[in-house]
Image (spheres, grey):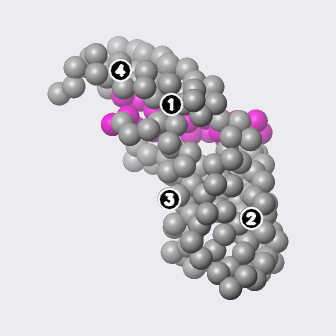
Amino acid sequence: MKSPLKIVFGMLLLAVLACNAGADVSIQADSEYTYLSASLTEQQVQDVLVNVLSNAQRIQVRDARADLQAGQIVVNGTLVTADGRQFPGSMTLLAAAASGALQITVQSMNFNGFTAEQATLDRWNADIAAGLNRVAAQTAAEVTEVSVTDTELKITWRRARQ
């Protein structure tokens, strides 16, 4: 069982990490939980996507541009295969809280008819979620809420108070 001091320290560490990432952070508490919410701007989300998608193995998306829209993230760019073929287009991502973690799902993609294997989509989903989730660092906190608006991606974590 963790002490209350360790829990508070952990939440403060999350806040510092999120602030260093440039996220707008708030901390709230009730009688059961401490909540940390981080709001990422469209540019911050784009920075994560550019890093993940342009450094992917085998298939990359170059010149990625994120467009936050109500409930989804639309990414435009050029898909480049391992053999150098290029396909301009876009993909739509959904962000949600699932089983206490941030989940990213490629809902649709249209890169001039290119079809990605499920393993590639699964890898992108995991890598993007990990990149966005880094504002939380390594804690036992669980993701409870994720929302996407035209201006921000907001992720809320909670940790039981003890």
Q: Do residues under tags 1 and 3 come within 8 Å of each other at their CB atoms?
A: no
Mark 4 lies on residue? 9
Disc number for residue 28: none
Query: Tag 1 or tag 4, which sits nearer the N-term?
Result: 4
Residue 121 in percent (x, y) is at 57, 69
Residue 144: give x, y in percent of width and height.
Answer: 46, 36
Q: Look at mark 3 in the image and give the residue it sits on.
A: 126
**Which quadrant of the structure image shows residue 151?**
top right
Q: Distance between the residues labelled 4 and 1?
A: 12 Å
Residue at mark 1: 17
2 left or right, relative to 103: left
Q: How crowded is mark 2: few (under 14 residues within 10 Å), some or many (20 or more)?
A: some
Quadrant (top left/top right/bottom left/bottom right) for the N terminus: top left
Q: Which is more N-terminal, label 3 or label 2?
A: 2
Nearer the N terminus, badge 3 or badge 4? 4
Query: Residue at left 48%, top 17%?
Result: 28
Considering the image in quadrants, where does the C terminus appear?
top left
Membership of 154 in magenta stretch: yes
Q: In this view, does 61 lie to the left or right of 142?
A: right
Residue extending furthest toward the bottom: 83
Q: Which amino acid does label 4 sit on?
A: Phe
